[in-house]
Image: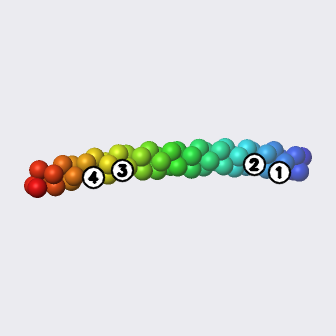
């Protein structure tokens, strides 16, 4: 009986670990996606700044 109980507890703990593992993987992917999105946004902003700087230089001259 006691062995059966421990086996049942082990299965529950293993299931919980698998759920946490899956959630961790999901969070890792979300962070990667967020990082990529931010980097793309920065690239767009950098391009805009470069164009503005060029326009300012053109107007100054």
Can the viewer see residue 50 in this picture?
Answer: yes
- N-term mark: 3 or 2: 2
Crowd around label 1: few <14 · some 14–19 · many ≥20 (10 Å): few
Residue 14 - label: 2
CA separation in Å, label 3 and label 4:
12 Å
* SS for callout 4: helix
Which of label 4 and label 2 is nearer to you? 4
Position of residue 61 measured from the top left corner of the image (x, y, whole percent): 11, 55
Classify 10 Å Cα crowding around label 4: few (below 14), some (14-19), many (20 and above). few
Assess disc 3: are there few (<14), some (14-19) or many (≥20) residues with their C-alpha within 10 Å of its C-alpha.
Answer: few
User: Mark 1 or mark 2, which has the lower sequence index?
Assistant: 1
Residue underneath mark 4: 50
Q: Is residue 12 left or right of residue 59?
A: right
Residue 55: give x, y in percent of width and height. Answer: 18, 49
Mark-to-mark CA distance, 1 and 3: 53 Å
Query: Label 1: which residue?
Result: 6
Q: Position of residue 51 (x, y in %)?
A: 25, 48
Residue 38 visible to the viewer: no
- In the image, what residue occupies the spot 71% across and 46% down? 18
**Of marks 3 and 4, which one's residue comes earlier in the chain?**
3
């Amino acid at each position: 009986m006691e062995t059966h109980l421990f086996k049942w507890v082990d299965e529950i703990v293993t299931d919980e670990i698998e759920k946490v593992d899956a959630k961790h993987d999901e969070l890792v992917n979300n962070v990667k996606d967020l990082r990529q999105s931010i980097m793309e946004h920065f690239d767009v902003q950098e391009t805009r700044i470069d164009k503005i700087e060029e326009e300012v230089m053109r107007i100054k001259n």
